[in-house]
Image: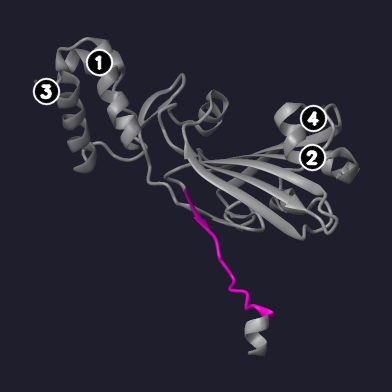
Amino acid sequence: MRSRHHDIADDLRQQITAGRILPGERLPSEAALANHYGISTVTLRRALTVLQREGLVEKIHGKGNFVRRPHRKSMYVGGWGTLDPWTAAEPDSRVTIRSTELQAQAHLATLLKVPTGSPVVEFTCLSVEGESPHGLARVYMPHDLVPPEALDDASTSREAARRFAFLAPPPTAARETVSARFPTPDEASALRIGIASVVLSITRIATDSTDRVIEATLLAFPGDRVDAVFTTHHVIDERQSQG
């Protein structure tokens, strides 16, 4: 037998797709909706969870449930860490940056190929368009490669956002590992998504000409808000070119 909360979700979905409830509009309170449908708030929340997972509704803590506005997708260009709109001239886009000096432990020490306890700098970056977060990045670098001015958290301009991939000398190689997974609690909170949502996760390791790791970046994007583009260049074997 079909569950009651699915019937409620169907009705609300139909109202949203028909335009009777507009993007950005706040839904009635959960208590009011439960009363309207003659159901418990537990059942009502199950219906809202269905719509949240579909991306039709988003719950903003302390404000309520809102019809989600269509998101403009960002584009991540693989290989060099270029991300639009972080460096784009979008007036409604902004980046917040926070730097922290810490010691590399366990997984981080392995990523950076440094001894445990080595001094490193973490840059936490959140890109937001309007009220919607588009991506979260944590960039780690050996402390000796970070210029003092890069630790100025007061700078949140687009120019500052360009720093992430190229704080150190330009890398000669970048290796990226891409996967789809559920967000961590911190990522879900920062990106304002449910813990059952899917994020595109990219781990980027950049090295210099001596094979030293100069940057390890952990990126997480809501799966519906980014396209990742990777270009492969065909390398002709020297023996073939001489044939």
Which is nearer the N-term, disc 1 or disc 2? 1
Span colored in magenta: 226-238
Q: Is mark 1 on a helix, strand or loop?
A: helix
Q: Name the residue under label 3.
A: 2
Residue 140 visible in image: no
Give the CA separation, mark 3 to mark 2: 54 Å
Q: Residue 104 carries which label?
A: 4
Q: Which class describes the residues within 10 Å of circle 3: few (<14), some (14-19), or many (20+)? A: few
For badge 3, the amino acid type reads Arg
Identify which residue is drawn at 29% across, 18% down.
45
Q: Which class describes the residues within 10 Å of circle 1: few (<14), some (14-19), or many (20+)? A: few
Which is nearer the N-term, disc 4 or disc 2? 4
Kindly indicate whether the residue at mark 4 contacts the one at mark 3 (C-beta within 8 angstroms).
no
For badge 1, the amino acid type reads Ala
Q: Name the residue under label 1.
A: 32
Residue 172 visible in image: yes
Quadrant the C terminus occupies: bottom right
